[in-house]
Amino acid sequence: MINSQLINPQSIVVIGASNDLRKAGGKMLHNIIEGDFKGALMVVNKRESKVQGQKSYASVDELPQVDLAILAIAAPHCPGVIEELAKNKNTKAFIVISAGFSELNETGAQLEQQMIDVANKYNAALSGPNCIGIINQNYHGVFTTPIPVLDSKNGCDFISSSGATAVFLMEAGMQVGLRFSSVYSVGNGNQICAEDYLQYLDETFNEKTSSKSIIMYLENIKKPQQLLKNATSLIAKGCRIAAIKAGSTDAGSRAASSHTGAMATSDMATRALFRKAGIVYCSSREELISIASVFSYKKLIGKNIAVITHAGGSAVMLTDALAKGGLQVPLIEGKDDDDLLEYLHVGSSVSNPIDFLATGTAEQLGIIIDYCEHKFDFIDAMVVVFGSPGLFDVENVYKVLNVKMDVCKKPIFPVLPSLVNAQKEIQYFLSKGHVNFPDEVILGKALCESYFTGDPIDSKIVDYGIDKHVIRKIVDNNKSSDGYLSSEENNAILDCLKIPRAHEVSAKTQQQVIESLEKIDFPVVMKVVGPLHKSDVGGVVLDIKSQDVLLAHFKEMMQIPDAQGVLIQQQLSGVELFVGVSYEKDFGYLLLMGLGGIFVEVLGDIKVCLCPCTKKEILYRLKNLKGYPLLQGIRGKKGVNLEAFAEIIQKISYLTQIMPEIQELDINPLLGEGEKIFAVDIRLRIS
Amino acid sequence: MINSQLINPQSIVVIGASNDLRKAGGKMLHNIIEGDFKGALMVVNKRESKVQGQKSYASVDELPQVDLAILAIAAPHCPGVIEELAKNKNTKAFIVISAGFSELNETGAQLEQQMIDVANKYNAALSGPNCIGIINQNYHGVFTTPIPVLDSKNGCDFISSSGATAVFLMEAGMQVGLRFSSVYSVGNGNQICAEDYLQYLDETFNEKTSSKSIIMYLENIKKPQQLLKNATSLIAKGCRIAAIKAGSTDAGSRAASSHTGAMATSDMATRALFRKAGIVYCSSREELISIASVFSYKKLIGKNIAVITHAGGSAVMLTDALAKGGLQVPLIEGKDDDDLLEYLHVGSSVSNPIDFLATGTAEQLGIIIDYCEHKFDFIDAMVVVFGSPGLFDVENVYKVLNVKMDVCKKPIFPVLPSLVNAQKEIQYFLSKGHVNFPDEVILGKALCESYFTGDPIDSKIVDYGIDKHVIRKIVDNNKSSDGYLSSEENNAILDCLKIPRAHEVSAKTQQQVIESLEKIDFPVVMKVVGPLHKSDVGGVVLDIKSQDVLLAHFKEMMQIPDAQGVLIQQQLSGVELFVGVSYEKDFGYLLLMGLGGIFVEVLGDIKVCLCPCTKKEILYRLKNLKGYPLLQGIRGKKGVNLEAFAEIIQKISYLTQIMPEIQELDINPLLGEGEKIFAVDIRLRIS
């Protein structure tokens, strides 16, 4: 419930502000004053008539009407004060920086709920509690320092679940010249969460004035679908977004299960969401800052990087990092290359990295950049590494760099490593609005991450002419006590989805086994019915080629505990594949896909998409499987038609849309050979 | 050829020094003066009688005897000056900072060789050319700034192939408080290379006075065996070593080949060498600095980390990073835990991460550390994350931290993220000799890397009672034109190594095929002899169970171009394994091992050891294969006895010791089932 009073208040009161700048209320007031807030600024402090030069009221009821109240008072007093302000002073926005609420204990949680109920009743925004506040162009409403350099258009918008992390991130960002457009600290976030600020940025986006870079530190994702929608929308408008979702390994402790869907972790869900939304996934402050720094420059639109340097070592390490991450430092050769060499000192190398030696000059740098910009068409971007051994000033070099970064169409990323020798010159460079990458390899990794995250992925639902009514009927008529659909129901659903399956016959007696051979040709597979982990108990026998062998195995299988009968299937060959479905609370269905057998069981070679997903997205994921070469076919063995496999997966995605009862769904394995892909085993449980 | 005159000269002359501090010679002299050099300091500059207050000689022949000459003059003059000094002035050490030698062109290379020849003739040390010089306790002989804080015992020794990288690394290290003991810049390094400085550190190591931390930036490894020897020795003496080897992706362009050994890259060789030596492998300045920072603290000797913080977000990200890297943040619970909680503010959490809230105090931090040190026995180390929101000074917190880091037996790693808010307090903290980790995740990764690098691995050669004379006779008698050993020779070597192999018979006629069945039982495998890529041309047929089928396939196979006959082998089952050998210049033989089939062909799941290698090393490597679960056996399928497989690999390691003619050696596949492991196919080429 973000409103204009929260974002752009015309009047602010700080409840509990004092003259003590070591206290949160005092520092909050100080920052608002220092931030040159243009509206009316008031204080409630019953012991003072003036606080930091501002008029102080002894109590809330003496206040005039006020847009935004910032509360720096003990938690138990907060609900009452909010009620009084909302009711009598037309206050429509609250920032509660006090702690002692739901993060503390049950009593605190009740207090927090009371506040939210009151705010909701009066249609007021409530930010926090337990947050540091808000910094934007309108006011500096935080009780912390530093206030970073604000730049509404070229700085980044920063939304943070954690106040301390926001502070530490701003501090680290300021070291490299990162500017901010706004900072929103969410705190407990039970009325306004991180996703709500993103929605606000989306809804108020202005092509000309808004920042195009958004970074987030998230401790949980409360509204994944909203996040997806607004991130996708913002990126379509030209923004770039990166986020940390902390707590990525928590779910590692989930119990193992034979159900492939259970392999999904909440981190997989987050990554699938981020990929779909086009959000760059980060794991540390340093990564988020380096990605935000990349965002502050022109967007990289190709893989070919020219590395320009006067220091070979940095260039080699950067080239390694780019190559490992999938970008390229292509060989530069030919006539233009020879021409360029003539402008440089003897011993320079222009084959890329372009090394113009320790004695390289500012003019030479300018010429090299001109060649990369205008003559080397295949070059998409430049990285310039230029430090100082401490002999002379390099400001002239950074001046050339500054202008070139301004006038060139291709992005230029600066690595200025001499934090000591060129401290002054780097400060000059940063003062021009640039961000520095002190470490070349960190830049290299950030370039690769941001380049390969890709654009948001369309989530159009395709129904492939599937008759959903037939499927609904099967589901609605299901009477199973444990939710598992029967073989017949499973097969009916596969048929309805037009997913080919192996012919099979179930048998409980020797006579039925013999009769099965009328319908199915050798070789056949026999599987026990009943036990869950069939393979582990010897309940699967492949490649049976005669009736005698078939009957012998039937006898053995019926001795397995819990055996109720057998399934006899036509034996198919091909590459083992699987598709599984997992439900992640709030996120919806995740689709897990990959090669079967050891690839899923041993190697965990699984790709995940958030439903609904398009064929394009599925194809992209499949091509990133470690086992992808097997899908293509290796060593004369036929692969699998990728389009056909992707279509089956997309049909399962559609199934999740029309069958929201799905608790568990596995097709494992499917067997694929070229266009022919057969579902061999399916398991489906509904609620 | 490092000598005492280079490391600890009693007199120094700077040839080409001037009063211009923007010139290399001038700055070099300035640094030596500022560094308070205690010996005689002279200058040769024909235009001045005094330079920077030091006596200047008009020419070299006027100089008195001098230990070390630093040359900052044009390359062509260097050989003559060196000859004159070495011959007439008893100069035994030279540092040539001038460029224009082998890094430039052939003429330069000849000049460089002349200098080296002269230096060698007079038994003198020659550092460089094209280097920045040396910094140690005795003199600051570099032409660059900054001169870092030197601490002979607690700083790190730093050896660098690149002068500029050395400067950038020192600058970045100084930001976090990293101290140095010495800095050796190698330059072109054709008389004294990086490995020679390491050898010097080893040979002059003094338990009481030497630094225990060594970092290296290497652009090439000229003497890998020397590096291995000295690194192993230094680590045995209590040192820790980390290194960057730049250019790790260069070898990615090697031509693909069916020979598994050809999959080895020079980066694999480097990694195998580093692992064997116990050197932590780094890929960036930032990684090397964070590892060096870890080295500056007590060694981590267990996996269990207590994360102590007043800021939840940092703790969560750090915990993620530690868990991903293999370390643990174990749950803390029980009575001591409850007791600790009583000392903290309400709302604190002690279950680990130990979060004592934004309001946490210095006293509370002290108490928490005391509990971790004395009561929580299973905790091996602590990380303390403590920043500042900017409300009050945190120097008292850092004072407690400072003392605890001094008195605790368990290592404590400090994350002080508030580079702005707590700038002054962090400076205080660094002034106590500590290093700071501004980013918790970078620390987490560095801790994991350094912990899991492990100690140097013993390289004892085990011969398993193999009769090497039989093998030598086979090799010495080999007459093949292409170097490939015959089937019979290969089999004889396998038999000599006591590596079991599948029974096989070769056949060229239908009659021989029929006769083969007298020796070998069905099922059998038939392979064509002649073509190289047998599988690709349909030259391998498995699971033949009757004479008719066998003869039918024989007919087909003999139609394959280049088919000279067939091999008929007993069909074995089990897990496919492989062992390969690759020769890397200067490094020696690399042993490649893993699972066969898709694991090697598709997944590149290969582990590499440098020969000779012990069973322990091999076992460790095998356990790190992605396909390791298959070696253990999965889903009721029998695995492979690891000891037995490791023994076969070690025998191949031994073979490389007694058969230095090996150019190419593959056993691919072996088939393993429990203790039974059979070599199915072997290829061996000698020079």
Image (cartoon, coloured by chain):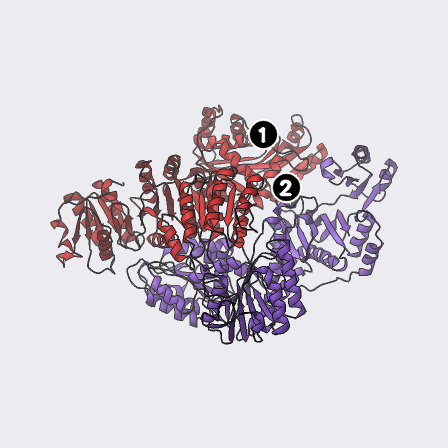
Chain colours: A purple, B red
Label whose residue precedes the other's in the sequence (1 or 2): 1
Question: Would you name the residue on which mark 1 appears?
Answer: B501
Spot occupied by residue B489 in the image (x, y as percentages of width and height) = 52, 30
Using the image, name the chain to which the residue with label 1 belongs: B
Using the image, name the chain to which the residue with label 2 belongs: B
Spot occupied by residue A616 in the image (x, y as percentages of width and height) = 65, 61
Rounded to the nearest whole Å, what is the CA distance between mark 1 and mark 2?
28 Å
At numbered mark 1, what does the secondary structure look like: helix, strand or loop? loop
Q: Is residue A194 above or below residue B429?
A: below
Quadrant of the snapshot with the N terminus of chain A? bottom right
Quick check: B527 left or right of B424? right
Check disc 1: other Cα within 10 Å, few if <14, some if 14-19, many if 20+: many
Quick check: A450 left or right of B519? left
Quick check: A510 left or right of A545? right
Quick check: B61 left or right of B284? left
Tell me if residue A367 can be seen. Answer: no
Tell me if residue B437 can be seen. Answer: yes
Residue type at the position of mark 2: Gln
Q: Which residue is at a point 72% across and 49% down the rendered structure image? A: A666
Spot occupied by residue B640 in the image (x, y as percentages of width and height) = 60, 33
Question: Would you name the residue on which mark 2 appears?
Answer: B559
Give the number of the disc on residue B560: none
Q: Residue furthest right?
A: A511
Residue type at the position of mark 1: Arg
Q: Is residue B175 above or below residue A413?
A: above
